[in-house]
Image (tube, grey):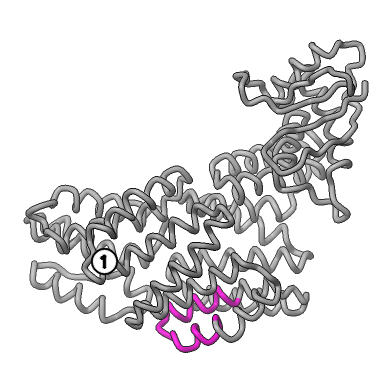
């Protein structure tokens, strides 16, 4: 039977396609029940024929992928649906349509070529739009397992998405595994290979291997330049600027953002990327003590764009950067309120544990500066311990150094010297990996004072 499928998933316009769902001997109610069980699609019979809508009101029952008549129904529907919704490049939309297509592709054990396109689109909807990295990663892992079971080889797009999801969720081992497989899978596709090299560079940056990160980024930047991909080249150059800033080369980093990248994003009309670039400029200005201009950029340039776009994650990060400026000015109560009431709920909802580590550290820092261990000692130590544990899990050497240095000193202050030596030793090793030898020397001096070493 032919059915007009109209999915109501929250996007601006209804999108329709006519598909042959098979199972022609079944009546509309029976097929409606199966489709609802398959993924929340309900058929409605009316004057215009039989239509299907997503139902958010009815509780859905869990159905095993690839079994029974539901799987056969999904398998019959997926091909025509993909054909109807794919653009001229063969890509599916990264919205509710892509997500429903991914679910049907998994239910119907679709061929690998369809499965990969559908899950990449559905996963991008979850990761980029809905900020649900956990659900996106579950889609990717299910698709990769199904593709392997078919005896096929997954392409690099799924590995790239898996890398980004694992990074957001703090799953460092999975991130490394996805990167390794993605680099191998992207051989022969210059653009995707460059994209995965850029992600590999970010991972190296996290672990403190700045030289390798810079080499990878420069390789990716040259590839994007050869491909005349202006946007991807600009994004990659921004990551290069971030590393230069981390190395203390702030003049060159500032020049790149102002002279090379801002003009590109303005010419492309990319409001979000322009706001990100302005935020990086504000980072450098803030580090130089130009807090008035940095605060103006945060409030007048960045925040309005993120609010206009509904980008809750970027808005929360920007609010945290505003809180840092307020803290430096002595407005500690407002700074703490922003971290706890505006940043933390977003980070927890998105399972963004890297941001949680950052928030806990800065909350402890604010409490310490406004009252010390005597007034909020238990809370301060708890927040620092959580931040340090997350930082170690992520392998973020910059966080391990900063958080561990403070936590170790406080452990020594409350007469826990063994714990203090262990934490400070890790912090010293982290700073050494980053080449920040002044911090290493300061930790070693403190360790000698309490009776230990930073080797």
The answer to whether residue 291 is magenta is: no
Q: What element does badge 1 sit on?
A: helix
Would you identify the image quadrant in which residue 225 lies? bottom right
Image coords of residue 361 (percent x, y): 29, 58
**Residue at 46% in and 45% down:** 351
Which residue is tagged 1?
327
Q: Quadrant of the C terminus?
A: bottom left
Callout 1: 10 Å neighbours few (<14), some, many (20+)? many
Does residue 269 appear to the left or right of 204 in the view shown?
Answer: right
Q: Looking at the image, which residue is at 74% across and 15% down?
A: 33
Q: Main secondary structure of the magenta part?
A: helix
Image quadrant assignment for residue 404? bottom left
On screen, residue 182 versus residue 422, left or right, reads: right
Q: Position of residue 203 (x, y in %)?
A: 51, 64
Compared across the picture, whether 310 is left or right of 392 comes to right
Q: Is residue 23 above or below residue 379?
A: above
Asked whether 448 or 384 is in front, the reply is 384
Q: Is residue 412 left or right of residue 2?
A: left
Report the residue at 55% width, 43% height from top.
132
Query: Is 213 placed above or below 132 here?
Result: below
Give residue 103's position: percent from left, percent from top. Answer: 71, 33
For the record, the magenta segment spans: 237-257
- Check the image and report above or below for 252 versus 208: below
């Amino acid at each position: 039977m032919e059915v007009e499928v109209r999915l109501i998933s929250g996007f601006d316009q209804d999108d329709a396609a006519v598909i042959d769902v098979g199972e022609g001997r079944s009546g509309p109610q029976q097929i409606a029940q199966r489709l609802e069980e398959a993924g929340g699609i309900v058929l409605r019979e009316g004057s215009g024929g039989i239509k299907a809508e997503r139902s958010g009101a009815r509780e859905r029952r869990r159905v095993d992928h690839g079994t029974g008549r539901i799987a056969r129904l999904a398998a019959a529907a997926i091909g025509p649906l993909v054909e109807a919704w794919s653009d001229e490049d063969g890509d599916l939309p990264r919205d509710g349509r892509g997500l429903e297509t991914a679910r049907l592709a998994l239910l119907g054990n679709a061929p690998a070529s369809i499965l990969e396109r559908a899950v990449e689109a559905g996963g991008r909807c979850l990761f980029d739009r809905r900020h649900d990295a956990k659900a996106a990663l579950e889609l990717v892992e299910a698709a990769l397992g199904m593709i392997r079971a078919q005896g096929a080889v997954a392409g690099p797009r799924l590995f790239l998405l898996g890398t980004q999801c694992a990074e957001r969720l703090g799953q460092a081992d999975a991130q490394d595994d996805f990167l390794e497989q993605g680099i191998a899978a992207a051989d022969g596709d210059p653009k995707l290979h460059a994209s995965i090299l850029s992600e590999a560079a970010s991972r190296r940056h996290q672990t403190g291997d700045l030289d390798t990160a810079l080499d990878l980024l420069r390789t990716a930047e040259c590839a994007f330049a050869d491909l005349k991909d202006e946007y991807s080249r600009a994004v990659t150059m921004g990551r290069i600027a971030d590393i230069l800033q981390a190395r203390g080369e702030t003049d060159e980093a500032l020049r790149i953002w102002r002279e090379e990248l801002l003009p590109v994003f303005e010419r492309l009309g990319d409001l979000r990327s322009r706001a990100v670039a302005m935020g990086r400029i504000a980072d450098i200005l803030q580090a130089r003590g130009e807090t008035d201009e940095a605060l103006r950029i945060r409030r007048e340039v960045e925040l309005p764009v993120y609010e206009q776009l509904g980008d809750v994650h970027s808005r929360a990060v920007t609010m945290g950067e505003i809180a840092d400026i307020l803290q430096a000015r002595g407005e500690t109560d407002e700074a703490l309120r922003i971290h706890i009431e505006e940043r933390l709920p977003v980070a927890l909802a998105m399972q963004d544990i890297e941001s949680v580590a950052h928030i806990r550290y800065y909350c402890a820092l604010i409490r310490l500066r406004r009252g010390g261990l005597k007034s909020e000692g238990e809370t301060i130590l708890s927040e620092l311990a959580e931040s340090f544990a997350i930082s170690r899990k992520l392998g973020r050497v910059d966080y391990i150094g900063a958080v561990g240095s403070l936590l170790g000193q406080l452990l020594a202050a409350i007469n826990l010297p063994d714990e203090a030596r262990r934490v400070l030793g890790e912090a010293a090793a982290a700073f050494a990996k980053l080449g920040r030898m002044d911090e290493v020397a300061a930790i070693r001096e403190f360790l000698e004072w309490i009776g230990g070493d930073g080797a």
